[in-house]
Image: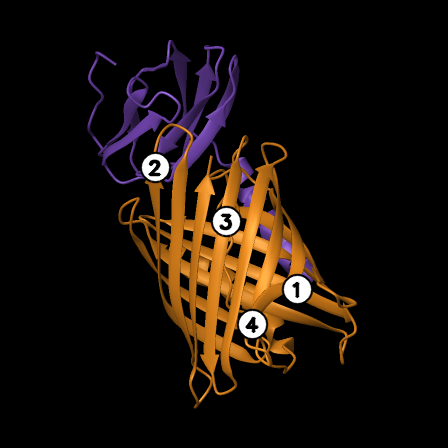
Amino acid sequence: MLRVLLSFCLLIISVDVLAARPEVVVRIKDNLFHPANIYVPADKKIKLTIVNEDDEPEEFDSFALNREKVIFGQSKANIFIGPLSPGRYPFFGQYHPTTAQGEVIVLAPGEEAPDAN
Amino acid sequence: MRLMLTFLLAGVLLLPLQTVQAEPSSGVVDRVYHPYILPFERELEWRFMSRQNEDGNELLQRIAFGHALSETVIAKFYAVGSRDEQHDDFGLEGYEFEIRWMMTEQGKYWADFGTLFEVEKYHNEKRWEVTTGLVMEKEIGPTSLTVNTLLVYVWGDVPDQELKTQLRVKYRYRWMPLLQPAIELYTGDDFIGIGPAFMGIQRFDSRRQLKWELGFIAAVDSVVKDHTLRFSLEYEF
């Protein structure tokens, strides 16, 4: 039984490892997210690489995305989100909630991100 | 398709329960563990469980302190109290040490996995209990399916030293932080119970938050009354 369970888990992990994912890099500097608006395609798993350039840690927190992740100062961390439906998903830095705020904006098929981003 | 795979996995995890041993149970309805851990996590927890069946009322409370040891491991120490049915007084039943390990990063794979290891020593008794198992969570849109598949081994001054299995399942709708309704299912020790549950999170400031859970689980395999009210408060700081 244990063997069946382990094989099943390994199969799930192998399939996921082989799948290529779009990656978006987000920086934290002076307790702000750059960019604050992150445009991603719908129905895809996305890898967010959060680079914390501040000395203090920050916690990426989003109830809408169902994610909580601590990024230590002067280091980076990965957050995997999606597949998501088109819409806006707010997030914030739990240690600096008044300044560190942003949104993941999921674009519908055919929709394009504004150039400003 | 995703939903089908979810139920397939739940079915695979259910298979070991065919070997459940028959014995009156007290600890089946407890808490459905999530696989996630945060570094710096420190928490105080109070858990309350009241079971009412034909044998009377069983009351169990746990007070715990937990501390993350790393980005993926948390340790927790519990003092467990219960009501003595003979003398109708509430006292210390045992001590429990728990380790949880987050095995995969949230969202990286098809589902998120963790493991649980608990050891409990009964107070003033030569009786030990070890619980270990797999903790899984699968995000399905705005809902989350959490499955705990556990093995429990009791030894010492007990009539039968045996290996038992438990399954705990929670299907939760992430409606809003403060209120997330769910359905919970518990099986083990010849017991199958199901019922509504609610959980929520209240944030106070950047590092302090209070999590609460409430559930009412009724036995579905019993013709007589057998239901459990469970409640927990977890303060993270």
Colour in which chain A is drawn: purple
Residue B203 is marked as 2
Position of residue B24 relative to residue A93, above or below, is: below
* Within-10-Å neighbours for mark 2: few <14, some 14–19, many 20+: some
Colour in which chain B is drawn: orange
Q: Chain of mark 2?
A: B
Which residue carries the number 1 mark?
Answer: B151
- In the rendered structure, the answer to whether residue A42 lies left or right of residue A70 reads left
Q: Secondary structure at mark 2?
A: strand
Which residue carries the number 4 mark?
Answer: B89
- Number of the front mark, 4 or 3: 4
* Within-10-Å neighbours for mark 1: few <14, some 14–19, many 20+: some
The residue positioned 60% from the left and 60% from the top of the image is B80
Real-space CA distance between mark 1 and mark 3, rounded to the nearest whole angstrom = 23 Å
Please tell me if label 2 and label 3 are on a single chain. yes
The residue positioned 65% from the left and 77% from the top of the image is B19
Rendering quarter of residue B25: bottom right
Q: Position of residue B50 (x, y in %)?
A: 46, 70
Amino acid identity at mark 2: Arg
Which is nearer the N-term, disc 1 or disc 2? 1
Which residue carries the number 3 mark?
Answer: B45
Q: Nearer the viewer, residue A20 or B21?
A: B21
Please tell me if label 1 and label 4 are on a single chain. yes
The residue positioned 35% from the left and 60% from the top of the image is B182
Which is nearer the N-term, disc 1 or disc 4? 4
Residue A117 is marked as none
Q: Is residue A9 visible?
A: yes
Real-space CA distance between mark 1 and mark 2, rounded to the nearest whole angstrom = 34 Å
Amino acid identity at mark 1: Leu
